[in-house]
Image: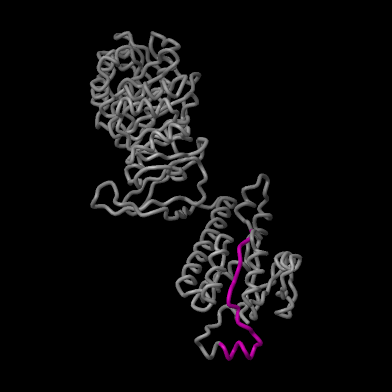
Amino acid sequence: MRTALISVSDKTGIVQFAKQLSELGFSIISSGGTAKELEKNGVSVEEVSNYTGFPEMMGGRVKTLHPKIHGGILARRSEKKDLDEAQAAGINMIDLVVVNLYPFEKTIEKDGVTYEEGIENIDIGGPSLIRGAAKNHVDVGVVTDSSQYESVISELKKNGSLSAETRRDLALAAFEMTSRYDSAISSWMRKQLEKPELLDLHYEKVRSLRYGENPHQKAAFFRNPQNHDANVTNAKVLHGKELSFNNIVDANSALELVKEFEAPAVAFIKHNNPCGVAQCVTVESAFDTAFNVDTQSAFGSVIALNRNVTKSIAEYINKNKIFVELIICPSFDLDALEMLMKKPNIRLLETGPLTLDEEKRDIKKVAGGILVQTANTYTVSKKELKVVTKKNPTEEQIDAMLFANIVCKHVMSNSVVFAKTENGCSFATGIGAGQMSRVDSVWIAAKKGGDKVKGSVMASDAFFPFPDAVEQAAAAGATAIISPGGSIRDEEVIATADDLGVAMVFTGIRNFRH
C-alpha cells in the first residue's frame, strides 16, 4: 500500500483530495488540525505521533521532524543500502507529500502584528517536508497547492502513478514556493531589525513574446505574483492579436497616465510618449479632444481611458477611421465591445476598477544591476504653487497648468507640455518630448501644436537653465508657465517672463522621466 503524508494549513479541497487518495489505495498519515479535519469527515488517518511513537511537543513546534518521517521521504528506492537501513529502523516509504505552509505573509500584513507573532508563524516542519520530497522527486510526489489536486488525482486514476515529468514539475513548484516563503521571511526580518535591504525579486512568466522591441530580439513577459493592482500586467485581453513587447510598454504608460485624473480622461500614446491627452466632463468629449491634439501621431497609437468605452466612442473610432493598436480601460460596454471586435487586429484590454498604487516601485535595469526608486506618484496641488512673476495666473490658467504638469510627468525628458482649459475640459495642445535641450522641446511642442498653442499654458519637467525656452514659449503664444524652478538663473528667467507679460509659477517638484 502506498502512503501519503498530509499536513496543510490551508485546508481548501483537502477532504475531497484525501478521500480520493484513500479510494486509490493510499494510507494516510497526518498531524494536528489536518488529521482532525480529515477524521471528522470520515477519512481514515494515522496520526504522526502514533506512527513515530513520539508525541507532538512544544505547542506543535515539533511533530513531523522525525527520522521515521524524513527517512520515508528521502530514502532512494533504487539504493539497496537506503532500503535496508529503513527496514532495520522500522521506516515505511512515503510516496506522496501534501503540505502547504503557515500563512506567514498574511499574518505580517495584519495591523498591529508583533515581532513575536511574526516569528511564531514561521513554518519549520512544512518546508523541511516539502524540500525533502522535492529533492527525492525521482521517487516521491510533492503537492504544495490546492490547484494541483485535480490534475494529480486525474493522473493517478489514469496511470496508477505520477510520471517522472509530473514529479519534476511538482518539485520545481515546491522549491519555488519555499524560495518565495523564505524571501518573505528574510525581507520582513530585515525591515523589523532595520538591517541593510536585500532586494530579492520574484517574477513568474506570463508568456513568451514573438519578439522584443525589434524582430531580432527575443522577449518574454513576467509578472510579480504579489501584484494585484489594476494595471496592464493583470489586465484581461478580450480581443485581438497577441500582445507585443511594445504594446505592453505603451499600454502601461497610457494607463498609468489616465489613472492620475479623477475626471473622465483619455490618453493616446505613441512610442511611450503621449501625443494626445484630455480630461473633460464626459469620456466621449475627452476622447474627441485627446484625438484632435495630434491626429497624425494618433495613427497606430495605444489608447487608455479611465472610464468605460461606450458605444459612442466605438462609433467615433469607426466614423473617423482611427487606426488603433490597442485600447485599455476599466471595461467595455457590451455594444461597444461588439462593434470593436469586428476589427480583427485591434487589441482590447480590460482592467476592472482603476486603482493608483501610491507605494509602487519603479525599477530600471543597467548593465550588471538595477536602479530602484519609488514611482513618481506625487501630484502638485494648487496651494503648493508659488507665483514668482508680477502677473498672477487666472483660475483657468491654474487649472490648465496643474493638468499640464501631470501630463509632463509621463513625457520623456527633456519635456514640455502646452495645454488649455476651456468649458470644463483640460487638454494638451502641444507636446515636446525627449530632447537634449529644453528649448528644442519647446520648439517641437509649438510646431506640433501650431495655432492651437496660442493662449495655452506651458509645463516644463525641470527648471529653465536659460531664458531662451521662456522666450520661445511666449513667441508661440504661451500665457503662463509652470516649472519646478531652482535654476541659478531663476531671477533672469523670471525677469524675462515679466518682460513678456507671462505669468509664472514654481512647484519645487521636478518630473524627470528617462
Is residue 347 placed above or below 488 in the rendered structure? below
Q: Kindly tell me whether residue 383 is visible in this rendering.
A: yes
Q: Kindly tell me whether residue 484 is visible in this rendering.
A: no
Quadrant of image for the C terminus: top left
Question: Which colour scheme appears in the figure?
Answer: one colour
Q: How many marks?
A: 0
Residue 406 drawn at (x, y percent):
41, 27
247 or 17, which lies in front?
17
Picture quadrant where residue 204 is located = bottom left
Residue 216 drawn at (x, y percent):
23, 52
220 or 410, which lies in front?
220
Magenta stretch in the rendered image:
83-102
- The answer to whether residue 91 is magenta is yes
Horizontal relation, residue 459 to residue 54: left or right: left
Is residue 166 placed above or below 423 in the rendered structure? below
Is residue 197 placed above or below 510 in the rendered structure? below
Horizontal relation, residue 324 to residue 206: left or right: left
Quadrant of image for the N terminus: bottom right
- The answer to whether residue 99 is magenta is yes
Picture quadrant where residue 58 is located = bottom right
Picture quadrant where residue 436 is located = top left
Q: Residue at x 50, y 69 (%)?
A: 171
Horizontal relation, residue 357 to residue 393: left or right: right
Residue 64 drawn at (x, y percent):
66, 73
Residue 74 drawn at (x, y percent):
56, 79
